[in-house]
Amino acid sequence: MSDISNSRKGALGLNIVGGVALLAAAIFFMQPQQSSTPDDPALLTLGGETLNHSELPPKLRQALERVELSAYRQRQQILQAAAVDLYIAREAEAKQESIEQVRQRLLPRPQVSEREIQAFYLGNQERLGASLEQARGDISRYLFRKKVQQQHQQLVDKLVRLEELQLLIEAPITEAIAFDLAGFPSKGPDDAKVTLVEFADYQCPHCKRTHQILKAVLPSYLDRVRYVYLDFPINRSGISRKIAEGAVCADQQQRYWDYQDRAFAQQEQLTETSVTAIAEQLQLDLPQFNRCLADEATADRVKRAEAQAIKAGLSGTPSFFINGRALELRQNLADELGAQLNQALEG
């Protein structure tokens, strides 16, 4: 008798649970559901609710876009290499030559001269931290690989120009970040079609090298491109933040870029005393400079730049954005930055 009673209770419990589940499902499907579009694809469902790309927190959204862009670049390189190999094979068949003969004709083995090795060493001696003889082999191999890559890219560009090659993969759609650039130091016209934003740290060795490259590359673009520098002081020493605040105060006296040049030039010797030492070297008005350093608004400007870097999901420096879209710079900053600026200006 007790078994039958327990059985009925169990059945009743199941019916109640089933009824609640059906009611919950009916209520859920009566709710308006988030629609997925090609520009805003659905990424996951959790507890019956769909999460689209646009609903991710900005930091995660940017991180996901960087992964997708990196994967796209790799696929692009693989397909371009396949296209070159296929083109060479077809040329060999058409010209009744061997594949190796055609390859040597289209992509002759590049030579690296002693002058090129010495020029590269002089331009990178500090970073290499070795004598010319110690670094010669690595430099020669690097320059050789760079020339091979340039040859391949020139052939790919030629095939695209002749409309013989078209890659059918689509670049991922990346979100343009609307940075608040008001009050930050800039070069170039405020109404430029293209805005280049850099986040950097005064104690970051890569940022120092980038600073030198930008000084060489940017001048020819500054009639059409606006360049804006934002601080992202990630070095744990705290010195980068202090130097950044010193640059803000130099900006009050219209000497921002001079202060920045000195700070990067003296990167290895920077200490907390460098903040005022650089001001003294530039013969700034020190009482005004020190009042500026004590003003909370000075630290707030650096924090405002830093907060934008964090919101954009950045974790390292230097980081670049063209019209709010992150740049994927891989090897040769000067060439790649110039190419992407040109592309943005033509777009």
Image (cartoon, rainbow, N blue to C red):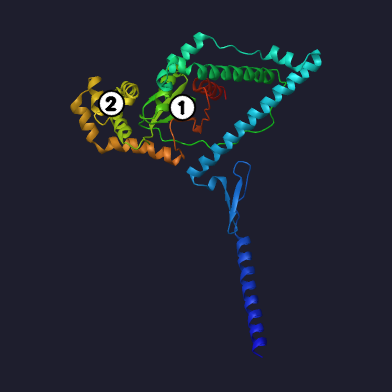
| Number of the label disc, if any, that sits on residue 196 | 1
**Dot 1 or dot 2, earlier in sequence:** 1
Query: Which amino acid is tagged 2?
Result: Ala
Question: Label 1, label 2: how many angstroms apart (C-alpha)?
Answer: 22 Å
Q: Position of residue 197 (x, y in %)?
A: 44, 29
Above or below, 72 against 81 in this view is: below
* 335, 271: nearer the viewer: 271
Above or below, 184 against 117 in this view is: below
Q: Is residue 93 left or right of residue 57?
A: right
Above or below, 157 against 3 in this view is: above
| Crowding at mark 1 (Cα within 10 Å: few <14, some 14-19, many 20+) | many
Residue pointed to by mark 2: 250
Q: Position of residue 186 (x, y in %)?
A: 39, 25
The residue most toward the front is 134
Query: Is residue 165 among the parts visible in the rendering?
Result: no
Tell me the quadrant of the picture where the N terminus can be found: bottom right
Query: Which amino acid is tagged 1?
Result: Leu
Query: Is residue 260 among the parts visible in the rendering?
Result: yes
Q: Residue at the spot x=18%, y=27% of the render?
A: 287
Q: How many marks?
A: 2
* 283, 206: nearer the viewer: 206
Q: Position of residue 294 (x, y in %)?
A: 22, 35
Find numbered disc 2 in the image and state the secondary structure of the residue it sits on.
Answer: helix
